């Protein structure tokens, strides 16, 4: 039987991409066009055709979640050997290589991966060394500049040489100290993992050749998000076989601020000789109306390869463009629409609220809380960022790598051991002078008279860490058992009970960490090790924890939403100065990126899209009266239905198309007023005229029947605790809950 018949369920262009196995290939995959399906089936076809063995395929993605889904689907499509494929993120692929060969460039196999908090700690220390004021040179800016330098593979020495002003010179000096501290701690940041792998390949041709021979086929997902060093990494690997297939969409390149280089995808054919380009333009996700809106917006961009999405899906509902008086009314409207949708049979998880900046989430979260809508903010306070979790993972990291100065400093006096900051600063100075780690200093504390007063305390700490390290290395303890040993020997739970607020919640969190460790061991089996667990949590992003199965409405920035899809999407704050942001006025090049972000937001919606804006918005403590976003003017009026505030200002109607300041005439003008097509208006949520009391039986259109068990006056509103028959007890605000007494 012809193997190709196994792929007859795919459309013509998808099949073409699957069967094109040799040489460089760029798959331009529009939103919702089934790119993951193509990747999985291309791998299946290569294996069924016996072109290589499973472990000779490298498939790179950008998140652990995407890598996991890809691997699961590959295993389902290729039962034998599917789990042997290298399906991983850039960082975890590089980590795997560096754990094996890092000694060639001066790292142990137990090197630590530093996150943003660790970076801040090191930069702060370096700034103190150089007497640099944080107010004049923010730590965030320094980290961004260092990251940019690493993306471009610029060393501290090169940066210092190129520095043409005082600020750049200071950053270059900080970069030098920062890299030295990382090296002394046997640690790397995320950017280092790629830079060091490229360095490893460049300095060790034998290792590069080994991986070039190993990987017969290389595939890279989300290629539009790659930066210079990522391009260098994959091009080095593919230099021998030339079988590199990249999948991406230049119209969804939205991570320039992270160093993504759209030129990588725009110039693919120039970088890889004899490259083929296949466009996937059939969309399986959205309605025709939503796609038409997306196409009309994105076609205004310059510097794009060009494609037009189309679908066989139905025309669908018009896009609702709602104008509210303020951000609070906007939030109330969104909450109201979610409740109406759930009352009509949808799940809370069918809805997503997207916004340009995190500051917009506050009003929406308040409205959801008052309305009893279960919700989750993606990009909020991550589990692994909680104080008690960072403490426990710091212990694990010091056991794995005692040279980790940042984590050692965190836990040396947690719980309190009488080892003060001054003593630790002196130990740190001695470590720098001797070119060793702080742990090496305190391990040999008797050799340093200046530390004699704390010698006994240091010895007790070292003795505990060494005992835990021996337990880990013995192989007699599981990771969960090792974790229990840490809790036991540090008496960390007692410390929480005696010294911290919300101790019960914190203890629940450290128990949850234990659950995560157990799950990790179950999933990884014999491959589960302390190093691999710590690596897994280092590389985890908030989006990796997004659970599509839980019935909660999600809120997130437009940047976080890429790769996700929802039946109903709200894009909030579609106003000039909010979206697009004010940066476009000082840097017109930013407009293309902002428009791509709008395109991403629109194409997240499958069935219904709401776009909201306000007449007045308070943001960062000041109130503004913004014109509507130019992106709204780029959506043809026949695709939209306008609702909301009847007193929308004339300025906001006419200033829309800020890109050329022209307003067209007649039906093609989205703002031409037609009495027969007058917009409909919905009333903002008013103060409830119904009074509620304990004992009242009520009927809520979403939660059903219930009884009020508590009523507490709060300002102009009343907080109600209601025991519902079906969903249990919920706390709602009277002005928001829209119930009737029964």
Image: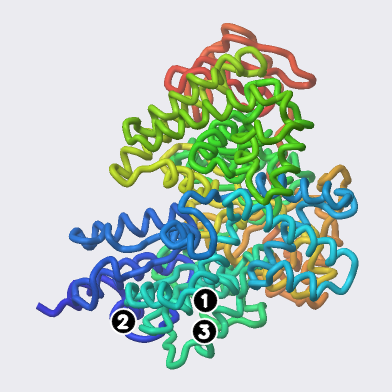
Up the image or down, 79 lies above or below 333; here it is below
* Crowd tier of the residue under label 3, counting other residues whose Cα lies within 10 Å: few below 14, some 14–19, many 20 or above: some
Up the image or down, 633 lies above or below 412; here it is below
Q: Position of residue 359 (x, y in %)?
A: 74, 45
Up the image or down, 409 lies above or below 677; here it is above
Query: For this view, does 94 lie left or right of residue 191?
Result: left
SS type, badge 3: helix
Q: In which quarter of the image is residue 454?
A: top right
Identify residue for label 1: 202
Identify residue for label 3: 268
* Crowd tier of the residue under label 2, counting other residues whose Cα lies within 10 Å: few below 14, some 14–19, many 20 or above: some
SS type, badge 1: helix
Please identify the quadrant where the N terminus is shown.
bottom left
Q: Looking at the picture, tell me which residue is in the foreground, 617 or 43.
A: 43
Q: Which mark is residue 240?
A: none
Write the residue at 67% across / 44% down.
117
Identify residue for label 2: 21
Mark 2 and mark 1: span between their CA atoms?
28 Å
- Residue furthest to the top in view is 695
Q: Position of residue 714 (x, y in %)?
A: 75, 18
Q: Looking at the picture, tell me which residue is in the foreground, 678 or 106.
A: 106
Q: Mark 1 or mark 3: which comes first in sequence?
A: 1
């Amino acid at each position: 039987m012809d193997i190709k018949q196994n792929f007859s369920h795919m459309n013509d262009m998808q099949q073409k991409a699957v069967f094109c196995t040799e040489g460089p290939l760029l798959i331009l995959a529009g939103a919702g066009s089934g790119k993951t399906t193509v990747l999985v089936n291309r791998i299946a076809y290569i294996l069924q055709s016996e072109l290589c063995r499973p472990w000779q395929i490298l498939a790179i993605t950008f998140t652990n979640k995407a890598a996991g889904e890809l691997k699961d689907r590959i295993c389902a499509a290729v039962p034998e050997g599917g789990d042997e494929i290298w399906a991983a993120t850039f960082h975890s692929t590089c980590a795997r290589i560096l754990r094996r060969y890092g000694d060639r460039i001066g790292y142990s196999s137990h090197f630590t991966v530093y996150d943003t908090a660790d970076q801040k700690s090191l930069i702060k220390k370096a700034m103190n060394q150089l007497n640099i004021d944080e107010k004049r040179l923010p730590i965030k800016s320094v980290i961004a500049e260092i990251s940019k330098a690493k993306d471009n593979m610029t060393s501290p020495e090169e940066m210092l040489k190129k520095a043409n002003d005082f600020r750049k010179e200071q950053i270059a000096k900080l970069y030098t100290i920062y890299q030295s501290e990382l090296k002394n701690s046997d640690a790397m940041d995320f950017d280092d993992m790629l830079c060091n792998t490229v360095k490893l390949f460049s300095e060790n041709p034998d290792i590069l050749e080994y991986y070039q021979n190993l990987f017969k086929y290389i595939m890279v997902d989300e290629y539009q998000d790659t930066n210079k060093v990522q391009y260098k990494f994959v091009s080095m690997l593919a230099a021998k076989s030339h079988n590199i297939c990249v999948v991406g969409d230049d119209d969804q390149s939205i991570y320039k601020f992270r160093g993504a280089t759209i030129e990588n995808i725009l110039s693919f054919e120039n970088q890889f000789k004899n490259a083929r380009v296949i466009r996937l333009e059939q969309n399986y996700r959205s309605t025709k109306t939503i796609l038409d809106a997306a196409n009309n917006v994105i076609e205004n961009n310059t510097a794009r390869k060009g494609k037009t999405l189309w679908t066989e899906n139905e025309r669908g509902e018009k896009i609702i463009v709602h104008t509210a008086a303020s951000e609070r009314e906007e939030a109330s409207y969104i909450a109201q629409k979610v409740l109406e949708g759930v009352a009509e049979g949808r799940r809370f998880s069918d809805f997503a609220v997207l916004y340009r900046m995190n500051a917009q989430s506050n009003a929406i979260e308040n409205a959801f809380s008052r309305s009893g809508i279960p919700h989750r903010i993606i990009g909020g306070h991550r589990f692994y960022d909680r104080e008690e979790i960072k403490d426990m993972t710091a212990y694990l990291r010091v056991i794995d790598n005692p040279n980790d100065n940042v984590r050692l400093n965190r836990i040396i006096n947690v719980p309190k051991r009488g080892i003060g900051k001054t003593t630790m600063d002196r130990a740190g100075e001695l470590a720098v002078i001797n070119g060793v780690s702080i742990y090496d200093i305190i391990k040999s504390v008797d050799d340093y008279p200046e530390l004699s007063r704390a010698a006994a305390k240091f010895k007790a700490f070292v003795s505990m860490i060494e005992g835990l390290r021996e337990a880990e290395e013995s192989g007699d303890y599981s990771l969960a058992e090792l974790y229990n040993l840490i809790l036991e020997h540090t008496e960390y739970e007692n410390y929480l009970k005696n010294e911290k607020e919300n101790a019960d919640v914190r203890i629940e969190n450290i128990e949850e960490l234990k659950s995560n460790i157990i799950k990790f061991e179950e999933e990884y089996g014999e491959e589960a090790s302390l190093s691999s667990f710590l690596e897994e949590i280092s590389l985890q992003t908030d989006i990796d924890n997004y659970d599509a199965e839980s019935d909660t409405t999600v809120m997130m920035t437009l940047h976080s939403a890429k790769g996700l899809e929802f039946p109903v999407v709200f894009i909030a704050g579609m106003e000039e100065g909010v979206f697009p942001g004010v940066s476009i006025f000082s840097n017109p090049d930013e407009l293309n990126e902002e428009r791509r972000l709008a395109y991403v937001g629109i194409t997240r919606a499958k069935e219904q899209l709401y776009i909201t804006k306000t007449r007045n918005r308070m943001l960062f403590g000041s109130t503004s009266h913004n014109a509507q976003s130019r992106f709204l003017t780029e959506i043809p009026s026949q695709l939209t239905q306008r609702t909301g505030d009847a007193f929308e200002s004339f300025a906001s109607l006419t200033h829309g198309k800020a890109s050329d300041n022209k307003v067209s005439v007649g039906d093609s003008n989205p703002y031409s007023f037609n009495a027969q097509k007058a917009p409909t208006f919905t009333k903002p949520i008013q103060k409830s005229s119904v009074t509620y009391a304990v004992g009242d039986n009520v009927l809520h259109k979403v939660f059903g029947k219930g009884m009020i068990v508590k009523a507490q006056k709060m300002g102009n509103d009343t907080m109600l605790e209601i025991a519902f028959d079906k969903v249990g007890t919920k706390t709602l605000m009277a002005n928001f809950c829209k119930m009737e007494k029964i």
